[in-house]
Amino acid sequence: MTDSVNLKEMFGDQFKVEYEESYYTERSKHTIEDPWLMVLLCQNGHICPWGGSNLAACTKSSRLIATRLKALPFVTVAQDGSDGANIVFDVAHFDQVAEIMKPRRRHRRLSDEERRAAAERLRQYQPAKGQSVQDLARQRSETARPCVPAGSPV
């Protein structure tokens, strides 16, 4: 079997990489990651490995998206059907294809420093050992300032 582009290694820090439906059927849950079964889910279909340095953009039924992809000078049409098209392209052209396919972006990840700062900030809302959440809420409500609408006489 030939090598393929590992989507998680190349694009995993920027886009959401998932596995195709058959991954867990063909493999157990505790197995190595198979790059052949990785997909980038997109707004207009998905992108998957095709072999070597090639990827495939598989469109949904949208004719407009398939037409826009087929117009790119560096693509090869592998399959063109009424339910979508499979367009093959080299990974070097990923940015142009991603602009059309719109892959799902990863959620923001906190750095270690941001995570520590957030933990410090939230620590004041953590109940002390032996204190219940209700006790903490009662204590906070007793010390809280009353909410006065802006412009009201105080």
Image (tube, rainbow, N blue to C red):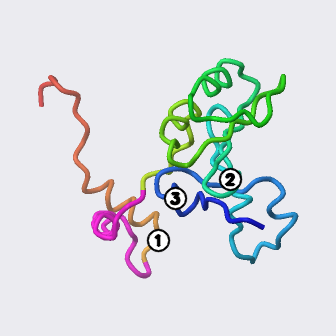
Horizontally, residue 141 falls left or right of residue 38, namely left
Please determine whether, in this image, residue 110 is positioned above or below residue 28: above
Query: Mark 2 or mark 3, which has the lower sequence index?
Result: 3
Q: CA distance from mark 2 to mark 3?
A: 12 Å
Q: CA distance from mark 1 to mark 2?
A: 52 Å
Q: Position of residue 103 (x, y in %)?
A: 56, 41
In the rendered structure, which amino acid carries the disc numbered 3? Answer: Met
* Residue 84 location, quadrant: top right
Residue at 60 percent across and 23 percent down: it is 71
Residue at 27 percent across and 66 percent down: it is 117
In the rendered structure, which amino acid carries the disc numbered 2? Answer: Pro
Please determine whether, in this image, residue 45 is positioned above or below residue 82: below
Q: Position of residue 75 (x, y in %)?
A: 62, 35
Label 3: state its secondary structure. helix
Q: Which mark is residue 10?
A: 3
Q: Which residue is mark 2?
A: 49
Specify start and end residues of the magenta stretch as a single range.
109-130
Q: Position of residue 7 (x, y in %)?
A: 59, 57
Q: Which residue is mark 1?
A: 132
